[in-house]
Image (cartoon, helix red, strand yellow):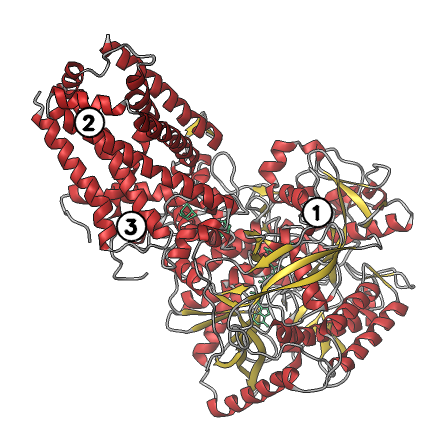
Amino acid sequence: MRAAIAVAEADPSLKVALISKVYPMRSHTVAAEGGAAGVKKPTDSLEYHFHDTVGGGDWLCEQDVVEYFVSQAPVELTQLEHWGCPWSRTADGHVNVRAFGGMKIERTWFAADKSGFHILHTLFQTSMKYPSIKRFDEHFCVDLLAEDGRCQGAVVIEMGTGEFTMIEARSVIIATGGAGRVFRESTLGGIVTGDGMAMAYRHGVALRDMEFVQYHPTCMPVTGLLFTEACRGEGGYLVNKDGYRYLQDYGLGPLQDKPKNKYMELGPRDRLSQAFFFEQQKGRTIQHPTLGAVVHLDLRHLGEAYLHERLPLIYEMAETFMGLDPAKDPIPVRPAVHYTMGGIRVDGRCAASLKGLYAAGECASVGIHGANRLGSNSLTELLVFGKVAGVEAARNAKSSSAGNSASLLKQAQAVEQRVMSLKTKPGGSEKISVLRKEMVQSMEEGCGIFRVEKTMRATCEKLSELRERFKNINIEDKTSVWNTDWLTAIELDYQLDVAQTMAHSAINRKESRGAHQRLDGFEQRDDVNFLKHSEAYYVAGGIPRIAYGDVKITKSQPAARVYGAAGEKADQERKGSHV
Amino acid sequence: MSDTKKIIEIEVLRYQPESDTEPHLEVYKVPFSDDMSVLQGVQYIKDNFDGSLTFRWSCRMAICGSCGMMINGIPKLSCETFLRDYYPNRVRVEAMAHFPIEKDLVVDLSGFIGKLESIQPYIIPREARSLEQGEYIQSPEQFNAYIQFTSCINCTLCYAACPQFGLNPDFIGPAAIALLHRYNMDSRDGAAEQRMELVASEEGVFNCSAVGYCSEVCPKHVDPANAVNINKTNAAKDYFLRFLSPKGGSK
Amino acid sequence: MKSGLKRSNAPIFWSLFGAGGMLSALFGPVLVFITGIAVPLGLLLPAGTMSYPKMLAFAQNFIGKGFIFAVIALFLWFAAHRIYHSLHEIGIHPGLLAKLLCYGSAFAATLISAYVLLGLGF
Amino acid sequence: MSKRRPYVRSMDGWWKKNPFFVEYMIHESTALFVAAYAFVLLVGLIRLGQGEAAWNGWLEAMKSPLSLVFHLAFLVAIAYHTYSWFVIMPKTLPPIIVGGKRVGPAAITGGGLLAAVVASIAMLALVWRIAL
Ligand SMILES: Cc1cc2nc3c(=O)[nH]c(=O)nc-3n(C[C@H](O)[C@H](O)[C@H](O)COP(=O)(O)OP(=O)(O)OC[C@H]3O[C@@H](n4cnc5c(N)ncnc54)[C@H](O)[C@@H]3O)c2cc1C
Ligand code: SF4
Ligand code: F3S
Ligand code: FES
């Protein structure tokens, strides 16, 4: 949506089709709680934000892109304020910022704990101001149209009628979000199925760094619903079954009473999730009768009034979903899948290798998250790169000519036939829900917090098997109107592609970096062989081909990634070497 | 999770536009555990009994606003309503009241979206400010004047609760008016007068007879009834002022 | 923005409704008690509370006149508005007739009470 | 051709379907009693205008058992109107801020009911004074 507004502002004469399979205000951005990062305090600097991001990403970031990103972040967040976003404020009326994991200085702009919700609704409502934006709500995009090496449109299904429409366009921007729903326990909405990634992938565009999948350390067991990082930013503790703040054992100490940036609970997500895993190995997690292994997120010392003011949603969720009062009881939590760092490979201006195709948001890999995204960088990413994608797409649209409608139509009809046949072909016997269950189970086993060759191999094989079985699916609902049975099958098709890229990229990365951690002899980072982006290419009927690309390094040379006291020391040294 | 699962009966109002002439109820027996929401119950039916069962959902955490249903006759978000609270009785699930049913539990929301668009839900600045000048300053009082009305998730439960909307589908209705009020009350905005035309129109606030159920069912405590009724006073003031003002008369 | 919105005339009726609702909420019960129960039964209040001379004096007094007028007229405007809406709600779709009946009788009562009160002199 | 066929449900009997609506209809129907009472008063006023004999006739009529029963019903209904009026009141008022804090709905309803009680006592006292 940020992109659509950018196009509309760049040139009101360009027509924009804004397509979404849900009403746009239902997009999963709505669920983001904590906030969006952008330098705000006088004590902060762009430089700090840059180093936090690059270090947090374990040096797998495109540093020139990160530099642009941090410089635009405050501008975009202010723009959103002008559009009406109700950022939380200080008593003197300025926008307030809070602490977030892996960030050196408080720089996360927040709107209570409904930041994503407010960003999304602000954008949605603001988009209504522009007559050139025509929305296609509840339209499901099934494929892109490409001809002469240019992306020239898309084919969509109107969910309400089941009818196909071809949308011709001189530029196409994909902003379809992440793909975390290929895992079992995730913080994500049902719509986060990676469709856009898979569509680009099938048109020959690489999916980059797909092995990096972020686990969020504090989620509700079983459902995976998220308790925002802001819980920890506001001073929550993580304790094991002995009531011990175990993070001090994992290089994040020493113990702090007040939340201190980059220490203890405010370490980065990958480290916290990994610490959970080790605690579980040591038998120090709490065995909950129905929820399984958990640790406690303890907010009690913050007091009821403070919790109501700063974390109202969390309070409500704990009460309704778990029947407990965070001011009185600790909350049982465990890690769950949260974010896909990788995505459609695009350059710093959001352009993919297919001309006319742009991508922004979680579905894209523009290069700022590297091997591990820092919390609150991604909401900002949507804004900064949404705008870039919009501006670039507008420019491209103005400078290119219209395509050949007749042959595009032919393509679109072929797409329609392919997609319709899923529903109409007789004699299938596989159930979508069964295939999906097997997929998520196998991803959880093979591509979890820690990975070993054997289970990854099993997952790769399982996925190939599922691909085969998918050919034999049976869709029970044969009707046209609102056929979600059919649409989930299309999603599953895409999910399988994305899952394959994740599993194959993972098994090929023989080192440990960021969110990709191995326990089978590759426990160390290997900058010699793997300071590289992985790139997964589509191979029709086969497994993805994995290639590697260079990482752009400008001013931050890879170093040990350390937090807590050790991190502070390293910072001092770096500062020394800079003068 | 315990092995001996309890079974609950879920009664669902089904409507398949391509074969049914009108909706009918169907009962399913669903095994459940205490942490299962009504939404999960319905998903279970789709995954295991009938793939054609249709409903909207996404976030599962009461924030995306897509999963509203009538649960035992009361408009609720199905993802934050739990089966354990109905067991051992049967629970009845229907499409949100007052909206046309598209299929099963999916209703037609295009009218609602049109209303959202009609209220000009964006800041029309009272005072221009460039990005270099930084953010607008808002005191805590100014902030508190509108913040409550920003929490609407567009779930439309309030419409399913409002009989006046049921009787007159043209009524702009609680959530859209709450959003309108949100922008009017925002110190950055200066377009309250422009929006008055709609507030005071025949589709506007005077359709409301202060039933108040909208606020009762609102999962986010937006209190849309309050927004609607405050705007009745505003519209009445505006109405009489127009007679008094030198320009005279209403448009 | 939709154009051609028709401005509703509801504010007039709604304001009368609101005023009547408030007045009847504040004074309704006690008035019923006084005029319909206490005085007829001779309870609580002194005998002759509503005797002709007293009532005449009350109705001739400026404030008393106003009060009587307000109570009768506003109570009826309030009731007319609500009843009109309730008819609509239970599906008797009120045509012009119902509208005339509800608001018309309130209007007539307003005129009559004004006429009588003025007739009583000051 | 679209296969959509949205089904519109009837609103018949909607107010019977939910206890909240039943209550709403009951409190709405108190208007009938308010109207009836206002008519009684209107008749009284007309009689007053017609002279002493007419007025005394009206006073006599008010003493009939039927009238008393009716007035008891009016009393109950209008008292309920008072109660429900103030219960809705918080939803109709702009926020009232006292000492930087928003006054809660219970306080507003309570305040309204208190005002009604005070008004009633004042009324009685006033009538008492005039009567003596
Ligand atoms: C619980 C939670 C909390 C988070 N908290 C934070 C935080 O505090 N800070 C932070 O920076 N980040 C946070 N994140 C991450 C961040 O919210 C996401 O990365 C970001 O919102 C992704 O936005 P997006 O626009 O790329 O995708 P989305 O918001 O998911 O939007 C994708 C859109 O594409 C549409 N779409 C997808 N497929 C199709 C198709 N086939 N056809 C048509 N339309 C399609 C969808 O309908 C949707 O409208 C959080 C994420 C979660 C899940
Ligand atoms: S006002 Fe409340 S009930 Fe109505 S749509 Fe918004 S959140 Fe839902
Ligand atoms: S329920 Fe409807 S009638 Fe008014 S108070 Fe709410 S909008
Ligand atoms: S699924 Fe999003 S509100 Fe229930």
Q: Is residue C80 above or below residue B160?
A: above
Judged from this view, the residue extending furthest toward the top is D132
Q: Are marks 3 and 2 on the same chain?
A: no
Q: Does residue A180 appear to the left or right of A286 in the view shown?
A: left
Q: Does residue A233 appear to the left or right of A349 in the view shown?
A: right
Residue visible at 61% across and 78% down in the picture: A353
**Residue B136 percent coordinates (x, y):** 43, 44
Kindly tell me whether residue A543 is visible in this rendering.
no
In the structure shown, which secondary structural element does the residue marked by tag 3 occupy? loop
Q: Image quadrant of residue B25?
A: bottom right
Kindly tell me whether residue A163 is visible in this rendering.
yes
* Residue position for label 2: D44
Kind of residue indicated by mark 3: Ala
Which numbered disc, 3 or 2, marks the residue closer to the eye?
A: 2
In the structure shown, which secondary structural element does the residue marked by tag 2 occupy? helix
Q: Which mark is residue A575?
A: 1
Q: Image quadrant of residue A13?
A: bottom left
**Residue A168 percent coordinates (x, y):** 48, 81
